[in-house]
Amino acid sequence: MAADPEPTTTNADSDTGYSDIATFAKAVELIRQDYVDGSKISYHDLVYAAMKGMLSSLDPHSQFMDPADFKDMQDDTRSRFNGLGVEVAVRDGLLTVVTPMEDTPAAQAGIQSGDQILKINGVSTDKLGLQDAVNILRGEPGQKVTLTILRPSTKEIKDYPLERKEIKVQSVKGVRLLDPELTGPFKVGYVRIVQFNEPTAEEFGKALDSLEKEGMQALVLDLRNNPGGLLNSAVDVLGQFLPPNTKVVSTQGRVSSQKHDYSTPVGVKERPRFPLVVLVNEGSASGSEIVAGALKDLHRGIVVGETTFGKGSVQNVMQLPDGSALRFTTANYYTPSRIVIQGNGVTPNILVPLSGEQERAVAALRNNDKIQPAEADGIIKSKDLQMMRGIDALKGVMIYAQQSTPKGDAVKK
């Protein structure tokens, strides 16, 4: 008669950590004892390398940052850093451009959202971690970097020689009333948010103030190629359009402490409920997806363009005693109607794809402040179909509102 099998323990039962930490410590000592290159076996180097591998094994957005990397991340949120101006992520195992930031070497060279970076300075990115790639892309101004890019839409592989420079991100740009040649009898404002940083909400409020003084009747909010940024900044921007204490995004993770609802702030200046269009594309990610998703779900704006990138996970940053930091995913974002942004993106109300030629023309317009207004209007009319469809949608809303407004009864004598 066969003996009964030994009872097995589950991972939860055995995952106390002590035996595994002992195994790790033994591995470190064996490497320090016998590894051939003595310059690579300090405790500091081995533990840092282990933490990099540990975080990168979790998902494409989790990473270990040494003190210098952590400082760079903090500089990002303050709208200033050195590099090429390209936001990257790992997508389907490939280092992929989320968006090239405006007025930067990457954007000016013609790099586009969705481009895949095959090599950096001739070195394959196949086994390069996200933080390692970012470290190579950044560096002292004036240094040259060559990116080998595969563009999935055309299957073209091309080298892009770029030069690093100091990048100062102006988060709110292009504030103006659009030309009547585009909008007809209506005064339609235009604002582009490039990234959600610390000063964004304040700058955006000032932009709306100036447009309202000019008599703005409707607004085009351009979030195309906006890679996101600070969650609180995106929520504060939504406070310009929605009543105080309106839930605009929620997070949910594995543990109850990661379940949060985020609502618009109180004390924000009340504004007229003017018609609103939000422009998005594949380069719209994270914070811009939160804004677009909330305005769509709450029926406050019409979203026009292409399905967004789908970067909707929450990363917490925890600083360690030596100045390094862990950045790891703790939850996913949900729009007000409980749609998961991660992997799905935000689908526009009005889907308007652009061809490669049209995308290049629009990108060139956004990155060249010397183009004259009349020429810019011509490019918008002929190439920027997303902008034109957005303007048409606003005009339709305003025409309908005019026709639906009841006329006052004549005074009876």
Image: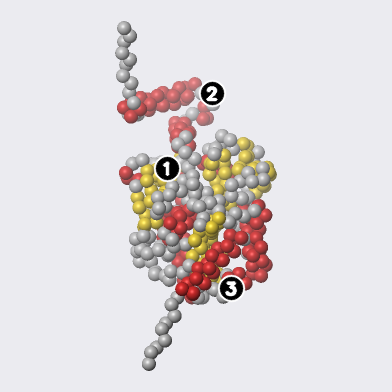
Q: State the separation of the CA atoms marked 2 and 1.
A: 36 Å
**Residue visible at 60% across and 54% down in the picture:** 353
> Tag 3 or tag 1, which sits nearer the N-term?
3
User: Going by the picture, which residue comes out furthest to the bottom?
Assistant: 413
Q: Characterize the local packing of mark 1: few (<14), some (14-19) or many (20 or more) Cα atoms within 10 angstroms.
A: some
Residue 53, compared with residue 134, is above or below; it is above
Disc 3 to disc 2: CB gap under 8 Å: no
Q: Quadrant of the C terminus?
A: bottom left
**Residue visible at 58% across and 71% down in the picture:** 183
Q: Characterize the local packing of mark 2: few (<14), some (14-19) or many (20 or more) Cα atoms within 10 angstroms.
A: few
Q: Which residue is mark 3?
A: 184
Quadrant in the rendering for residue 350: bottom right
Nearer to us: label 2 or label 1: 1
**Three-letter code for the amino acid on which mark 3 is drawn:** Gly
Please name whichever residue, 289 or 33, is drawn nearer the observer in this view of the structure: 289
User: Going by the picture, which residue comes out furthest to the front?
Assistant: 412
**Residue visible at 51% across and 23% down in the picture:** 35
Q: Which residue is mark 2?
A: 36
Nearer to us: label 3 or label 2: 3
Instruction: Name the spot of residue 232 as percent of width and height, x first.
Output: 41, 56
**Three-letter code for the amino acid on which mark 2 is drawn:** Val
Find numbered disc 3 in the image and state the secondary structure of the residue it sits on: loop
Q: State the separation of the CA atoms marked 3 and 2.
A: 74 Å
Please name whichever residue, 8 or 117, is drawn nearer the observer in this view of the structure: 8
Disc 1 to disc 3: CB gap under 8 Å: no
- Specify whether 258 is left or right of 364: left
Q: Which residue is mark 1?
A: 329
Quick check: can you spot residue 82? Answer: no
Instruction: Name the spot of residue 15 as percent of width and height, x first.
Output: 34, 28
